[in-house]
Image (cartoon, helix red, strand yellow):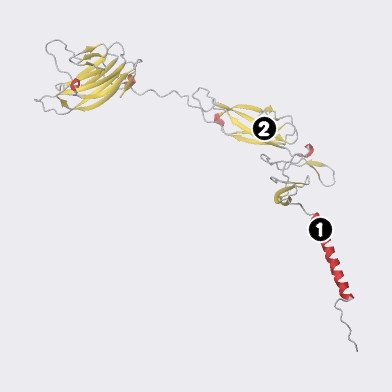
Amino acid sequence: MARREIQVFNMSFLDMMTNFLGAVIILFLLAAQNVSKSPGSGMVRKVEGSFDQDRLIVHGQVPNAALGDTLMLILKDNDPVLRSNAIASIGNSGIGRREERKYVDTTGMRIAKLPVNQRPEAIFIESATTSDCNDARTTDKTNDDTYTITLKALKLGKASSGYTVDGRTATYQNQVVLGPYKMSEGKKKLVVKDAMDGILTKEIEINPPTPCKSNVPPPPPPPLPAAPKVPGKVNFYVSWEDPNDKVNIYVRKGRKWVFGGRPSDSSIGEFSELRSNTGPFNRKNTNVETVRQMNQFIPGVYEVYAHLREDRRSKTKEIPISLWIINEKFPYESKEYTYKLNPTDNNPRNSGGKLLKTVEITTEGKFIIR
C-alpha cells in the first residue's frame, strides 16, 4: 500500500489566513480615517469661562492661542459676564420685561473684536488725578480749601456721544476737569453714566490730595535775650563779679588791637569801661569792659580775648566771666557765653589770656559766630 504525501498548507488554512489579512487591512483604513479628522500639532489648553444663557455665548480668556490648538472648556458659572438687555416673556401673556443683569467691569480684559451688534459694552476709567490743595488763604481750614479732579473715561462696545458725571457732560477719550470740591468733604464718589444708555454706569471713589499748609499766623517770636542796655551798633561786652579782679578785654582785627591801653581804632571800634565817674580822681573799679562800634557796622573778622592779670598778693586762681555779643540792628542775634578765666602773666598780645569767640560782621550787620 503506497503512502500518501502529507500537505501542510491545505485549502482551509489558506482561506483562514486570507480572512485575517482582510480584517487587518480594514482596521488600518478605519484608523487612518480617524487620524485625518484629529487636531493638528497644536497645544492642548484648558480654558475657564462663563456661559451666557441669554446670548448662548461662552466667555473665556485664552492667552497666546494659535491655529490648531485644542481647547478644553471648563464652565465656572452660567451668569452673563456683561449686562444684558434681553426681553423675556412672562407666562403666555406676551408682555415683555427688561432684565437687568450683573455688570462686571472689563478693565484689563482682552476682548475679541465682535460685530457691533454683539460687542459687549463696558465703561472703565483710564485716569483720575487730583490737583494740589487750593489754599483759600484763611484760617478756616474746614470749609475753604478746595481741589479739582481730572477724569478720563473710555467705553467698549457701541459708540456713544459721551457720558455724564457729577452734573457735567463729557466725551469719552477726552479729559474733563471736575470740581472744585472741598477738602473737608473727604473721599469723593463719582458715577460715570453713559449718555445713550443710563443703565450702563461706572463708579469711582477718589481721595483728596494732601491738605494745604496752615495759614495761621506764625507764633510770636521768642522774647529778646536779656542783653545789657548799652549804646552802640555792636558791643563785645565782658563782665565779671568782683570789681577788684583785674580783667581786661582785647579785640583784634588782623594786626590791629583795641584794649584799655589802645582805646580806639577806626577799623575796630572804641574801648570803654562804662564808668559813671570819669574824672581823674575818686575813680572806682568796674566789673565791665566793652569794645563797641557806635554809629555804623564795620564789616570784618574779630577775635575777642579776655585777660585776668596775675596778682601775687591775691589768692584768686580762677573766676567766672560772661561775654555778651550784642547786635542793635538784629537783637535776636545777641548771645551770651560764659567761661572760667585763669590768671596769666602775659596778655593776649603776647600769647596770654583766653580767646573767647571769633565773630564775623557782614555788610548787612549780621553776625557769624565761630
Residue named by callout 1: 32
Q: Nearer the viewer, mark 2 or mark 1?
A: 1
**Residue placed most toward the observer, 78 or 295:** 295
Residue 6 location, x and y as percent? 86, 81
Above or below: residue 341 compared with residue 103: above
Q: Quadrant of the C terminus?
A: top left
Callout 2: SS: strand
Mark 2 or mark 1: whose residue is earlier in sequence: 1
123 sits to left or right of 218? right
Q: Quadrant of the N terminus?
A: bottom right
Residue 361 is drawn in which quadrant?
top left
Callout 1: SS: helix
Please, which residue is most extreme toward the right here? Answer: 1
87 sits to left or right of 269? right
Q: CA distance from mark 2 to mark 1?
A: 56 Å
Residue 26 is drawn in which quadrant?
bottom right
Residue 299 location, x and y as percent? 32, 15
48 sits to left or right of 333? right
**Residue placed most toward the observer, 144 or 22:** 22
Residue at left offset 67%, top offset 36%: 124
In the image, what residue type sits under mark 2?
A: Ala
Residue at left offset 82%, top offset 62%: 28
| Label disc, if present, on residue 153 of the rendered structure | 2
Residue 72 location, x and y as percent? 73, 52
